[in-house]
């Protein structure tokens, strides 16, 4: 009888412990209040958003839309870091009405670009890592405010769905899938990037990247267009994917009947399926080239392969990893 009681008590204790662990895991998952434990410290994961804004007459509508998506997602960032550029910034502070997160105006000036914001994000992450903090950063911008068009509208909505409206997919993938950055699609072609240049990333990865405001020289003699190798005005888009050892996640599957590679092609299919499609996993997707060869993009395979090879070689030189491959 004593043995039976002891076994029952042990089972009950195990049940309580298991229940407590399940509740803690569920709380961490839903609140994104993850904790990392080491023998010496326990600390909370911080979430910071960096918003690059070209402010003109069309920007308020887009900014309201994007911040409403993030607000309704249930994910509250610790701070929204705003970089506003334009000749008239008088209405910029309206964004405080569209978010419940603290707003930090990092830079407000007549002129600026993505490099300014990304350089500040890079410095922020480097400092966070030195302080021993665990931080995820969101980078986004009101795509289409400078060049309004129907296809830019679709582009912004497709990319925004996975990083702003449904960021839980990326955050879960990063926390449990051990990836460094996440967005709608990670494409190695024509250069490694997240199409649309909106993403979540881990500061521990970002801190290892080269400063984005320092021009690169590794590809200056390559006889290929700028868009092909991620330089010039395409450098800001390539920056987050530039490290040869990046572990990327993306959230839209590679489908033969709804193929999205990069750019504008295939966005109608993303729009058609995105509401019911959340498939965030470690990439690059192994069947991307195989499906591309069967798609309307098949004619572009050769140039994309040449672009990727040249860019990858330049990236390995930039990071001193000439003898490493993915």
Image (cartoon, rainbow, N blue to C red):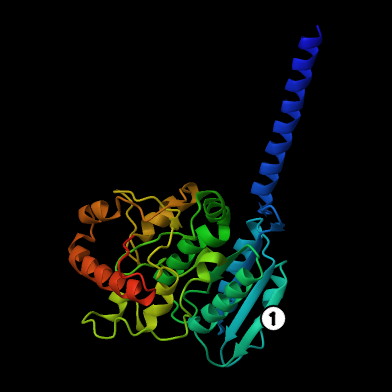
How far from the left and from the top, in percent, is residue 189?
30, 65
Q: On the rendered structure, is 5 left or right of 144?
A: right
Extreme residue toward the top, this view: 1
Residue 279 seen in render: yes
How far from the left and from the top, in percent, is residue 174?
53, 55
How far from the left and from the top, in percent, is residue 202?
55, 63
- The quadrant the C terminus occupies is bottom left
Mark 1: give few (<14), some (14-19) or many (20+) Cα within 10 Å.
few
Would you name the residue on which mark 1 appears?
93
Q: Residue at x 35, y 69 (%)?
A: 321
Tell me the SS state at disc 1: helix
Extreme residue toward the front, this view: 39
- The quadrant the N terminus occupies is top right
Q: Residue at x 45, y 70 (%)?
A: 240
Above or below: residue 120 compared with residue 37: below
Residue 149 seen in render: no
Above or below: residue 80 compared with residue 294: below
Q: Residue at x 57, y 84 (%)?
A: 55
Above or below: residue 290 compared with residue 314: above
């Amino acid at each position: 009888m004593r043995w039976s009681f002891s076994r029952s008590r042990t089972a009950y204790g195990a049940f309580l412990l298991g229940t407590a662990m399940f509740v803690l895991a569920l709380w961490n998952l839903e609140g994104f209040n993850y904790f990392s434990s080491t023998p010496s410290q326990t600390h909370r994961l911080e979430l910071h958003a960096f918003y690059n804004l070209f402010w003109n007459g069309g920007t308020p509508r887009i900014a309201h839309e994007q911040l409403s998506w993030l607000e309704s997602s249930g994910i509250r960032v610790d701070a929204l870091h705003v970089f506003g550029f334009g000749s008239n910034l008088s209405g910029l502070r309206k964004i405080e009405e569209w978010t419940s997160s603290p707003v930090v105006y990092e830079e407000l000036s007549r002129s600026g670009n993505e490099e300014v914001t990304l350089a500040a994000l890079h410095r922020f992450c480097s400092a966070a890592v030195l302080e021993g903090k665990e931080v995820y950063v969101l980078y986004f911008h009101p795509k289409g405010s400078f060049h309004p068009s129907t296809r830019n509208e679709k582009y912004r909505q497709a990319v925004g769905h996975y990083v702003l409206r449904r960021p839980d997919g990326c955050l879960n993938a990063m926390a449990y899938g051990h990836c460094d950055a996440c967005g709608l699609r990670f494409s190695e072609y024509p250069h490694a990037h997240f199409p649309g240049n909106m993403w979540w990333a881990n500061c521990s990865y970002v801190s290892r990247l080269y400063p984005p405001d320092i021009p690169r020289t590794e590809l200056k003699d390559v006889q290929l267009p700028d868009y092909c190798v991620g330089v010039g005005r395409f450098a800001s888009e390539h920056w987050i994917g530039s490290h040869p050892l990046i572990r990327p996640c993306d959230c839209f599957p590679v489908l033969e009947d709804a193929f999205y590679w990069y750019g504008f092609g295939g966005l109608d299919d993303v729009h058609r399926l995105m509401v019911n499609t959340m498939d965030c996993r470690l990439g690059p997707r192994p069947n991307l080239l195989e499906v591309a060869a069967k798609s309307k993009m098949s004619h572009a395979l050769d140039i994309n392969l040449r672009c990727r090879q040249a860019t990858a070689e330049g990236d390995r030189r930039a990071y001193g990893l000439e003898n490493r491959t993915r």
